[in-house]
Image (cartoon, grey):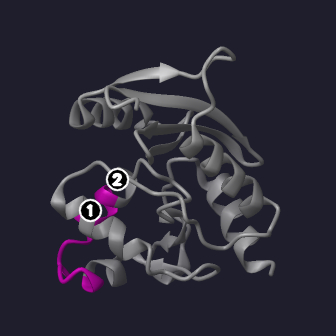
Amino acid sequence: MDKNFIRIRHYSAPCGGLLLGACGGSLCLCDWTDAPHHTAILRRATRELRAVLKEESAADTPHATLDMAAHQLDEYFQGARSTFSVPLRAVGTPFQQAVWRSMTRVPYGRTLPYSALARAIGSPNAVRAVAAAVGANGLSIFLPCHRIIGAGGALTGYAGGLTAKRFLLELETER
């Protein structure tokens, strides 16, 4: 089912527009549509998955993975969900994959500096490479790159913009 397509759907979050994408039974995209690296992330996903983007239309059969992702995002933004169970398929290099796996260990409502993330993956001198991998994350929110911060707690770059990053961190700490 859809093995040659990445089915995409637009999702309107309270802090910006997201593009959700699913290939088969896994979510492979949750990317900010206004992000500077949006096109590069789409290119990487289509190249690595050997698939083409196909936007959902009203005539299409609903895609269970996209429905599940949108529903879980709705619950997250309503404050009713702190973890996700959507099957994910992150597309990136082995180093990026290691960084993204480590990001998932940052608990809801907590943050971690880039330097600590670099230490967590066993590459304490690779802070810039870790920051680049965080920035290449094509599964925002599901792989919580918004929880990664600069030294001294500084809110640094975020694909969805610093306003969205601040929104997500405040959403998670309000409970």
Mark 2 highlights which residue?
90
| CA–CA distance in space, label 1 to label 2 | 7 Å
Disc 1 and disc 2 in contact, CB within 8 angstroms: yes
Left or right of 147: which side holds 138? left
Q: Position of residue 38 (x, y in %)?
A: 44, 35
Circle 2: residue type? Ala
Residue ID at (17%, 79%): 123
In the rendered structure, which disc, 1 or 2, sits on the residue that comes first in sequence?
2
Q: Position of residue 167 (x, y in %)?
A: 72, 61
- Is 12 included in the stretch rendered in magenta? no
Instruction: In the rendered structure, find residue 97 and report the number of the disc placed on it.
Output: 1
| Residue 120 drawn in magenta | yes
Residue drawn at x 68%, y 63% as measured from the top left: 168
Residue depicted at x 36% and y 52%: 89
Q: Residue, x 74% and y 70% (percent of image)?
A: 170
Work out whether residue 7 or residue 118 is closer to the camera in this orientation and state it.
Answer: 7
Q: Is residue 90 left or right of residue 159?
A: left
Residue 163 place in picture, x, y as percent: 68, 53
Task: Specify few, some or many for label 1: CA neighbours under 10 Å numbering under 14, 14-19, or 20 or more.
Answer: some
Q: How many marks?
A: 2
- In magenta, the rendered stretch is 119-133
Measured from the top left, where is residue 15 in percent x and y? 72, 48
138 shown above or below 171: above
Whether residue 26 is visible to the viewer of this picture, yes or no, is yes
Secondary element at image label 2: loop
The label on residue 167 is none
Quadrant of residue 173 within the rendered picture = bottom right
Picture layout, residue 66 above or below residue 52: below
In the picture, which quadrant includes the N terminus?
A: top left
Looking at the rendering, which quadrant does residue 41 occupy? top left
Q: Amino acid at mark 1?
A: Gln
**Main SS type for the magenta part?**
helix
